[in-house]
Amino acid sequence: MKNTPLKNKTLATYLALFLGLFGILYLNKNKNKNYGVAHILLTILFIAGFILFQNNQSSILIWGLLWLGVINWCAVWLTSIYYGLMDENKWIKYIGIHKDEEQVKITNIRFAKTNGLTVLCIIIALMLGMGSLTAFIAFTIQNYYM
């Protein structure tokens, strides 16, 4: 068994939901930090596009920035749902504690169980993802025809 700290699935799901890809970095500290940098850049570009749009400036570039931000956050919420619905044995393999099936079965998987808080986080992620994507599609169509 590696000396990998146990990573709680519920905590990782909430971090991915509210902190975006910074929450995903909670799991992948040593793997790849480019996701966090990409998330920061896309969020900054989304905010810049939103500010420009609020100042009655509308162009293809601004709409592209807005869509990049919406898709970025929808991907984050989808990742949160993926973490929350992951099976316990798959979670243990995902965070890299054990690679062997026999060791996975004998590991105390209390930290990998899905509980009521995890289900609540999945519901919140579904509502945020569906609501923001649907609202932005409607907003885009409305502004196209105005």
Image: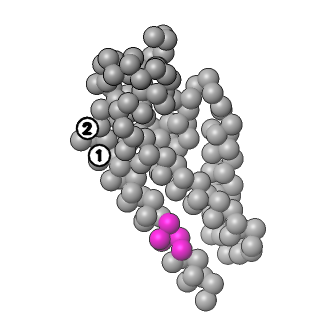
Amino acid identity at mark 1: Val
Range drawn in magenta: 133-137
Amino acid identity at mark 2: Asn
- Badge 1 is on which residue? 119
Residue at 65 percent across and 31 percent down: it is 32
The verdict on residue 47 being magenta is no
Residue at 63 percent across and 64 percent down: it is 67
| Image-based side of 113 in relation to 90, left or right | left
**Image x and y of residue 78, in percent:** 48, 52
Label 1 and label 2: CA atoms lie apart by: 7 Å
User: Closer to the camera, 45 or 3?
Assistant: 3
- Badge 2 is on which residue? 115
Q: In the displayed image of the protein, which residue is found farthest to the bottom?
A: 145
Q: Is residue 23 visible?
A: yes
Majority secondary structure of the magenta segment?
Answer: helix
Quarter in which the N terminus is drawn: top left
Q: In the displayed image of the protein, which residue is found farthest to the front?
A: 102
The answer to whether 37 is drawn above or below residue 30 in the figure is below
User: Closer to the camera, 110 or 131?
Assistant: 110
Q: Is residue 18 visible?
A: no
| Image-based side of 112 in relation to 72, left or right | left
**Image x and y of residue 142, in percent:** 55, 83
The verdict on residue 136 being magenta is yes
The answer to whether 11 is drawn above or below residue 134 in the figure is above
Secondary structure under badge 2?
A: loop
**Image x and y of residue 83, in percent:** 43, 41
The answer to whether 3 is drawn above or below residue 88 in the figure is above
Question: What number is the disc on residue 77?
Answer: none
**Image x and y of residue 109, in percent:** 31, 24
Cβ–Cβ under 8 Å for marks 1 and 2? yes
Residue at 56 percent across and 32 percent down: it is 25
